[in-house]
Amino acid sequence: MTQIDVGQLYLTNKRILIVGRLKTTSIKLHTISRVIAHKQGIEVGKLTGKSPLLLLKRDADVAAIICRRLLKEA
């Protein structure tokens, strides 16, 4: 696994936003097929392309729950 960037994770009702030191990345909720919780982060399963693993300092399980709820409501 290669670390690509470090930054802040934001969850909205339309997208997941990763504001990194190098660049900002947005993943629209309607392009996500699943969210898998891991011990240190969440894997965002996209319909197309690579599925990123977002490593979190804390509360990965909470982030996964919020993402799943947002997907249901999207």
Image (cartoon, grey):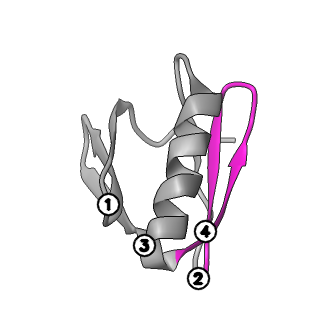
Q: Residue furthest front?
A: 73
Q: Earlier in the sequence, mark 3 or mark 1?
A: 1
Structural distance between the alpha carbons of marks 4 and 1: 22 Å
Mark 4 and 1 residues: CB-CB less than 8 Å, in contact?
Answer: no
Structural distance between the alpha carbons of marks 2 and 4: 7 Å
Residue 43 in sight in this render: yes
**x then y, percent, for residue 12:** 30, 53
Mark 2 and 4 residues: CB-CB less than 8 Å, in contact?
Answer: no
Q: Where does label 2 land, which residue? A: 48
Q: Earlier in the sequence, mark 2 or mark 3?
A: 2
Graded by Cα atoms within 10 Å as few (under 14), some (14 to 19) or many (20 or more), the crowding at tag 2 reads few
Q: Nearer the viewer, residue 56 or 70?
A: 70
Graded by Cα atoms within 10 Å as few (under 14), some (14 to 19) or many (20 or more), the crowding at tag 3 reads few
Quarter of the image where one finds residue 44: bottom right
Q: Can you say which quadrant of the picture contains the C terminus?
A: bottom left
- Above or below 40: residue 43: below
Graded by Cα atoms within 10 Å as few (under 14), some (14 to 19) or many (20 or more), the crowding at tag 1 reads few
Q: Nearer the viewer, mark 4 or mark 1?
A: 1
**x then y, percent, for residue 16:** 37, 55
Q: Amino acid at mark 3?
A: Ala
Magenta residues span 32-48
- Above or below 34: residue 7: above
Q: Nearer the viewer, mark 3 or mark 4?
A: 3
Q: Where does label 3 land, which residue? A: 74
Q: Which mark is residue 50?
A: 4
Q: Secondary structure at mark 4?
A: loop
